[in-house]
Amino acid sequence: MDKRKALILSLAAVLAAIVAGVTLTKFSAVQAAADVQVTPSMMQCWRSPGWLAEAMGLRVRGAPHGMLRWRCYELVEVSEEFKENVVNIAQGDADVQGLLSQGYNITAVRPIIKAVIKGDGTLLTKATGAVLTLRKDAAGCASVWVDLEQGRVTRIEVSTRTVIEKP
């Protein structure tokens, strides 16, 4: 009886491995032809199971089929030169200057990376923009989108939080 159970469990494990391998191979072929856009607005890191489903080509949270969203930016090292370039472009914008004069500080620079997989399997990557995070104490946060190709700020989102503590 023990040999029979061991054999059944072994066969089940082998079958599961084969199915997983075939499934992942199929979905990786679908992704090979897709353009990939990595944006910080979707940052949740690898702790979220969503990255696995999206890597397999499944639709997650309204993402169009074939769009892969990476959620972890600790894997990308940003050079000081890149940061300085992005900050200089942002500081040239009047609205960003206004936020900085109101007491906001630049706390993060996250790249927007475009990756294209060519037909021969060659991977081309380029940082096409960045998102700056500006914070003001604990009450305010702003995100500034910078387009590096155009050399300008394309979008600013400001969020404020008011806390009223009552005894």
Image (spheres, rainbow, N blue to C red):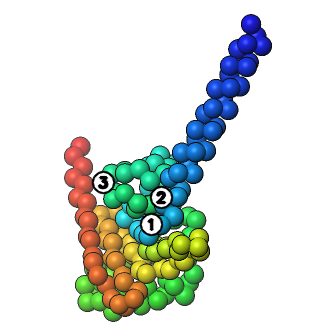
Q: Earlier in the sequence, mark 2 or mark 3?
A: 2
Q: Earlier in the sequence, mark 3 or mark 1?
A: 1
User: Label 1 near label 3: C-beta < 8 Å?
Assistant: no
> Which residue occupies 46% across, 89% down?
85
The residue to which callout 3 is attached is 62
| Amino acid of disc 3 | Gly
Residue 54 left/right relative to 99: right
| Amino acid of disc 2 | Val
The residue to which callout 1 is attached is 34
| Amino acid of disc 1 | Ala
Crowd band around label 3 with a 10 angstrom C-alpha radius: few (<14), some (14–19), many (20+)? few
Q: Could you tell me how far apart the alpha carbons at marks 2 and 1 are, in whole angstroms?
A: 7 Å
Which of 74 and 87 lies nearest the eye of the viewer? 74
Question: Could you say where residue 59 lies in the image, as x and y percent from the top left?
Answer: 37, 51
Asked which quadrant contains residue 151, the reply is: bottom left
Asked which quadrant contains residue 17, the reply is: top right
The residue to which callout 2 is attached is 30
- Work out whether 96 lies above or below 31: below
Check disc 3 and report its element: helix, strand or loop. Answer: loop
> Which residue occupies 26% across, 65% down?
159
Asked which quadrant contains residue 1, the reply is: top right
Number of numbered discs present?
3
User: Label 1 near label 2: C-beta < 8 Å?
Assistant: yes
Outermost residue on the top side: it is: 1
Numbered disc in front, either 3 or 1: 1
> Which residue occupies 33% across, 51% down?
61
Crowd band around label 1 with a 10 angstrom C-alpha radius: few (<14), some (14–19), many (20+)? some
Check disc 1 and report its element: helix, strand or loop. Answer: loop
Q: Could you tell me how far apart the alpha carbons at marks 3 and 1 are, in whole angstroms?
A: 17 Å
